[in-house]
Image (cartoon, rainbow, N blue to C red):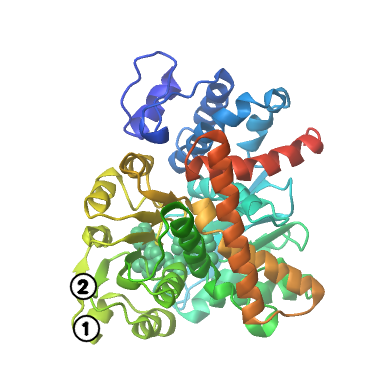
Amino acid sequence: MQVWDRKLENMKLVRASSETALPSYRMGVSVMLQSAYMKRVYDQVLARDPDQKEFQQAVLEVLESLEPMLEKHPEYEKAGLLERFVEPERTIVFRVPWVDDAGNVRVNRGYRVQFNSAIGPYKGGLRFHPTVNLSILKFLGFEQILKNSLTGLPIGGGKGGADFDPKGKSDAEVMRFCQSFMTELQRHIGLDVDVPAGDIGVGGREIGFLFGQYKRIRDSYDAGVLTGKGLDFGGSLARTEATGYGLCYLTAEMLKCMKNESFAGKTVVISGSGNVAIFATEKATALGAKVVALSDSNGYVHDPNGINLDVVKDIKLRRRGRMKEYAQEVPGSTYADGFKGIWTIPCDIALPCATQNEIDGEIAQTIVKNGTMAVAEGANMPSTPEAIEVFRKAGILFAPAKAANAGGVATSALEMSQNSMRYSWTFQEVDAKLKDIMTGIFHNIYNAAQEYGGDLVVGANIAGFQKVANAMLAQGLV
Ligand code: NDP
């Protein structure tokens, strides 16, 4: 009973009246994890890694969703499938020593979580951010398994990174860090083994340095070993745009199918101002919406006339500056400190594209009060379970990250395909495939939601899980 108590405290849940029941958030009513099997698996996660809150949160959400499906598949329990599913196949933790510009030796911690290879080589980004730890990478790697499965492409799930902050570092420092990081990582990855990509803090510059070091050590031009590469050395057109564009394609399909609506004429708020936020802004604007706010970790900009994306790109992509500078350069816009305040701005469509757990229950209430019709997650797990519950109760359309932001990894897989063929598709070809994939993901999760009587969160978890689970069953006890 102890681990359940700790979990309840962690997630600020109300204590259940039953001794063995865990309250959860499905479909606007407090429901319980019914199955003894589920509870056992979740207990094991809590007992094994009691401090990994983000990972616990991700596992709980998925287990809740899978309950109706597992009832129909007793073979999964017999095969110990869930116990295996929540435990990474391999976790690598390593020292990353490097020298800063002043000649000081610095040491960071590097990670690679190789979570699940049932349907393809491990695939998932690298995150360089001071908050990186094993809990965050396990949550991201776990989500990645399902997300990659939803793309319909043959890629397993993984995630990695380091507690290194590229912010404020010179290009030379970032290069030395990346070279040291790859000196260890290279022995664990490979074309058909594990294919990392970018994530927060890892953009084109970092991928270039990482690829250069891999090639130098391995003496082999394995272009497909990393994705998100520059266009001159095996990168795919439209990869940079893919997560943000894909988010809008899926959101557009959800609006059309579930509300007979579109982006045209809508007001949109997008948090963040990194890769995902910038290209979500570009596509939402192209689809006829007005994006009125963006943020960074210090604060947010409100531009009622519609965000001028050229200015944002200049600040963020070329100057590596802060959003504060936008308000100094664009008349009629304002800047406020504190990144959470962005959600007080009324909008029709909310696209959180910054980081995990940025929308809590209280912020979700504000979003609902402001009359928002749809929330689609560009970032990974930006909404807390309490926030998702608020959206469900309010009947707002809600597209979870593992479906809504799968466009990035889907296009990474297209980059791998092009590398294998030693051939490049045009921007239009890749963009068209991306649109098809995102539209397909929406219908896949929508159909699963209909079949099992849940919402899109349930649909995404079930649709993503089924393919991986069947592959694991077929491959025996591995
Ligand atoms: P970037 O590093 O390009 O941008 C991240 C943005 O989020 C920046 O504006 C950053 O502000 C802000 N941010 C980061 N940490 C925090 C924090 N703790 N609080 C508030 N704001 C924060 O990353 P991406 O745009 O690539 O990624 C954004 C999200 O999307 C992440 O959750 C990532 O996992 C997810 N994602 C990304 C994909 C991709 O293809 N890039 C694919 C799928 C998911 P600041 O500059 O101040 O740090």
Q: Nearer the viewer, residue 198 or 424?
A: 424
Please name the amino acid that badge 2 sits on. Answer: Tyr
The x, y position of residue 241, in whole percent, is: 53, 74
Q: Give the spatial CA distance, label 2 vs label 1.
A: 9 Å
Nearer-N-terminus badge (2/1) = 1
Which residue shows up at 47% across the image and 71% down it? Answer: 275
Q: Quadrant of the N terminus?
A: top left
Instruction: State the image quarter where residue 84 is shown.
Output: top right
Q: Amino acid at mark 1?
A: Gln
Question: Along the horizontal axis of the image, is 65 left or right of 337?
Answer: right
Name the image quarter holding the C terminus: top right
User: Does the CB distance between marks 2 and 1 fall below 8 Å?
Assistant: yes
User: Can you see residue 175?
Assistant: no
Occupied quadrant, residue 9: top left
Residue shown at the point (41%, 50%) measured from the top left:
398
Q: Position of residue 263 (x, y in %)?
A: 39, 67
Seen from the viewer's position, the closer of residues 405 and 220 is: 405
Front residue of this view, candidates 447 and 242: 447
Residue 335: assigned label: 2
Residue 126 placement: quadrant: bottom right
Q: Which element type, helix, strand or loop, lies under badge 2?
A: strand
Which label was assigned to residue 328?
1
Query: How packed is label 2: few (under 14 Cα within 10 Å), some, or many (20 or more)?
Result: many
Q: Is residue 349 visible?
A: yes
Residue occupying image coordinates x 32% and y 39%: 393
Counting the numbered discs, the total is: 2
Vertical relation: 2 (above or below) 477: above
Task: Tell me residue 311's x, y (percent).
Answer: 34, 85
Front in this rendered view, residue 141 or 94: 141
- Residue 350 lies left or right of residue 80; in this view the side is left
Q: What is the secondary structure assignment of the residue under circle 1?
A: helix
